[in-house]
Image (spheres, rainbow, N blue to C red):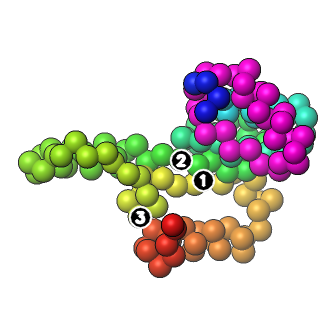
Amino acid sequence: MLGGFEATAEALAASIAFEQQGADFIFAVAGGMQATTAANSIKTKKSSVIWVDATVMGTGPQYASVTPVSATKGLKEGVLATIKEAYDGKFTNKAYLGTLKNKGVGYVITPSWSKKVPAKLQAELKDLAADVGAGIITIK
């Protein structure tokens, strides 16, 4: 943790340090920090960013040039699951865990990058995600 979701100075320092260590991709897993990380990637041309929470095209299209993929939260699915539990009288206040199976998490390839990522690799990623979601591949 770098000090909070808006710790942009710390995010910039971490991004620079990751690049100095040879990082090709930086996964800035806190909303406000990803813009700082992506801006640094644009400036240095040393790394790419994995956008978080929503798609880069929806929340930061100016960073699409350094963002090949977005890791998304399926908030709609979580909200619907909670409403259904309440409606069915089964609400427990148990934490919702978003998974590939319940579409609580996912990924979206940035459109401008889709031609740069070979179709075969995109198909393999789609198959792997489906296999993880189906429990064929387990993550420990």
Q: Identify the residue at image location x=58%, y=24%.
A: 4
Q: Are marks 2 and 1 in contact (CB under 8 Å)?
A: yes
Q: Residue at x 72, y 28 (%)?
A: 11
Which residue occupies 72% across, 70% down?
A: 121
Q: Report whether residue 71 is seen.
A: yes
Q: Which residue is mark 1?
A: 108
Q: Amino acid at mark 1?
A: Val
Report the label total.
3
- Label 1 element class: strand
Query: Which of marks 1 and 2 precedes in the sequence?
Result: 2
Which corner quadrant of the image does residue 114 belong to? Answer: bottom right
- Relative to 98, residue 140 above or below: below
What distance separates the C-alpha of mark 1 from that of mark 3?
A: 16 Å
Based on the picture, tell me whether residue 117 belongs to the magenta stretch: no
Q: Is residue 36 visible?
A: no
Amino acid tagged 2: Thr
Q: Which mark is residue 101?
A: 3
| Residue 80 percent location from the top left of the image | 28, 47
Q: Secondary structure at mark 3?
A: loop
Q: Is residue 56 left or right of residue 130?
A: right
Identity of the residue drawn at 67% across and 51% down = 69
**Where residue 110 sits: x, y (%)?**
68, 49
Res 54 label: none
| Magenta-drawn segment | 5-32
Image x and y of residue 31, in percent: 58, 32
> Which numbered tag is attached to residue 72?
2
The quadrant holding residue 33 is: top right
